[in-house]
Image: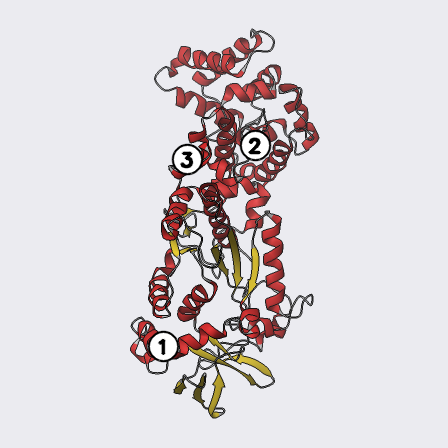
Amino acid sequence: MSDIRNQALEGRAWPFEEARKILKRLDNKPPAKGYVLFETGYGPSGLPHIGTFGEVVRTSMVRHAFRTMSDIPTRLFCFSDDMDGLRKVPDNIPNPEMVAKFVGDKQRSFGSPLTSVPDPFAKYESFGHHNNARLRAFLDEFGFEYEFQSSTDWYSSGRFDETLLMVLRRYEQATAVVLKELREQRRATYCPFMPIRLRDGRKQVLEVPAVEIKAEAGTIVFKDEVEGLFEVPVTGGNCKLQWRVDWPMRWTALGVDYEMSGKDLIDSVKVGGQICRILGARPPEGFTYELFLDEKGEKISKSKGNGLTVDEWLRYGTPESLSLFMFGSPKSAKRLHFDVIPRQIDDYLTALKRFPAQALKEQLDNPVWHIHSGKPPREDDGLPFNILMNLVGVANTEDKQVLWGFISRYAPNTSPATHPLLDRLVERAVNYFRDFVKPTRRFRAPTEQERAALAETIAVLGKLPPGADAEAIQFELYEVGKRHGYAQDLRGWFKAVYEVLFGTEQGPRLGSFVQIYGVAETGALIGRALAGELAR
């Protein structure tokens, strides 16, 4: 057994903990189907969102951890519940009137199956197919290794038929589990099977009571106000299961070994596990992750729109920084808003910089090992995002070429071609500064104490030897602060510098910033502040 496998088996990072659960489940032997199946779910009533990304990237991390520990083959299914009925018209689609008539009435109909709703974008055969295509493009963009699966395909092709008949044969037991979770009024009419019928020229997923269960025939007799009594086979795509039973039916039919889900689905997981056992199968290993909160600490909701989309994150941050956000403390609720992006970028850069010098055990605990499937890139001379943003502001330019002029002077062998990650960060720093920092900057004039300290700073910078590094510059800045009454409050000294020079209360490590921006240029900047030019 290789050293990396031995170390992975003892790894402390949470993906290793999850992978060990799967190994214990299998007793280190391949399952009968010959592979370990990981699954993630997606509801295509809307476009893929940041929660979709989080679930797939976290599951992929567990899958990679498992592959490091074991030679048992694995597969990852991204399963789209595209046979679900359309409950409401999304706010962000064209031609909403085209879709509106396919929405259910919320009493008897769940609406038309998503793969039977016309595509308002006029690109695919249905709205469900359109959103599925967006999901695949979304996952492909991030390089995920997965197999797409469609609920419509599985139901209609008959691949679920055997398990659906099993649910029918054990109808009373499975239904009893769900009834415990329902309100009394709902229990009276609940049936886990929903017939799909042609009504008013369009397919509808109906929620109507069952009158008779014919397990031997594989059919159910339903009754509603439109057709009265009608008998429907549960196979061949004629019926769809309600969510609480559909999920464990899928686990059983596919043989799912691992699936994670959000805290809001804890009860569904519990119910699903019981039904899965009733069907004679073993529930998958699971992982419950906490939900995201907005900047006010409220749960993020797609209907409220209080949160970030993947596209919004990627305007200001990198995919790697988003993966880092998903990696960190998944069992703790985290605030997901624009202010967290710079910190995630810099934390990623720090982890990436540490990786090459770390021992193998430390590397396996390093987030970048999990983000990059064990092969993180090597890029030297990375600059903190905080410094890049302040460089944008002080240089008073949003031109990447001008900014690269400063960077290349600091690191002569650095260019967009040799450092593509840094080039992406420069672009995102411009975006973040323009949209979030620039509108909130509030320069102030220095106090007399600060004026004296800043004047001496100009003199000290002028005496530095050519090529002074960041640490030497930082030391001299410390000493200036100490000589001007900040010996016990160096944090206050640097805060004053940030407010006077950058118009913000927080800023970069000044020694590094001065080295990049230039000693003479920094002296000139301080001179402008003392002349009152910045605080106008």
Q: How crowded is mark 3: few (under 14 residues within 10 Å), some or many (20 or more)?
A: few
Amino acid at the residue labelled 3: Asn
Going from N to C along the chain, the mark reached first, 2 or 1, is 1
Kind of element beneath mark 2: helix
Residue where numbered disc 3 is placed: 6
Residue 479 shown left or right of residue 387 in the figure:
left
| Up/down of 237 relative to 145, above or below | below
Residue where numbered disc 1 is placed: 170
| Up/down of 127 relative to 1, above or below | below
- Residue 68, position as x, y percentages in the image: 47, 41
Residue 313 shown left or right of residue 191 in the figure:
right
Amino acid at the residue labelled 2: Met
2 vs 1, front mark: 1
| Image quadrant in which the N terminus is located | top left
Out of 210 and 304, give the one closest to the viewer: 210
- Residue 124, position as x, y percentages in the image: 67, 67
- Please report contact status of discs 1 and 3: CB closer than 8 Å, yes or no: no
Residue where numbered disc 2 is placed: 389
